Amino acid sequence: MVDADVMMATVASGLQVTDRYASARANPSLDDTQNLVNVSGALQDGRTLIAYSRPLDSGDTDNDIPIGVGKSVSVIWACGETDTLLKHVSSGVAVIAAMCSGKWLSV
């Protein structure tokens, strides 16, 4: 998805989570500033579970999209058959409302 703030993760060879930005229909570029914290992940019952937090407004005006409190946010997801993070085989979209106070969103 073009102009999307992206988090990519895998747990197969140890937890790897990266903050990225998609400027074209290609593998999203790695952000110069990694704004994801409190990262955890595991492979459980054949499913990959990832949790992380990021600031609602990271100040990274080049690569992160601010999340407004009380605003709806479109979240896209994709899954691949391998952990190469190069090609997904399924994807979808969900809309969430950032109904939180403070400066952090935890997913």
Image: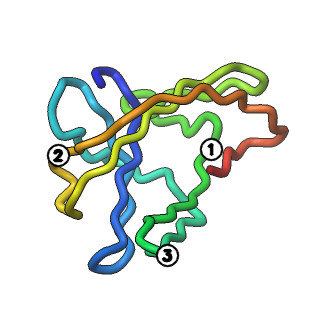
Q: Residues within 10 Å of mark 3 (few under 14, many from 20)?
A: few
Percent x, y of residue 52:
57, 58
Relative to 51, residue 74 above or below: above
* Residue furthest front in the image: 45
Q: Amino acid at mark 2?
A: Lys
Tell me the residue at 26%/47% (across/down): 30
Q: CA distance from mark 1 to mark 2?
A: 28 Å
Q: Earlier in the sequence, mark 3 or mark 2?
A: 3
Percent x, y of residue 20:
33, 43
Relative to 88, residue 45 above or below: below
Tell me the residue at 24%/39% (across/down): 28
Q: Would you name the residue on which mark 2 appears?
A: 87
Q: Amino acid at mark 3?
A: Gln
Q: Secondary structure at mark 3?
A: strand
Quarter-wise, where is residue 99 in the image? top right
Q: CA distance from mark 3 to mark 2?
A: 22 Å
Tell me the residue at 17%/60% (across/down): 84
Q: Would you name the residue on which mark 3 appears?
A: 44
Residue toward you, 107 or 62: 107
In this rendering, would 25 be left or right of 14? left
Q: Residues within 10 Å of mark 2 (few under 14, many from 20)?
A: some
Q: Secondary structure at mark 1?
A: strand
Residue toward you, 15 or 78: 78
Q: Amino acid at mark 1?
A: Pro
Percent x, y of residue 57:
61, 34
Residue toward you, 35 or 84: 84
Q: Would you name the residue on which mark 1 appears?
A: 55
Q: CA distance from mark 1 to mark 3?
A: 27 Å
Q: Residues within 10 Å of mark 1 (few under 14, many from 20)?
A: some
Q: Earlier in the sequence, mark 1 or mark 3?
A: 3
Relative to 92, residue 2 above or below: above
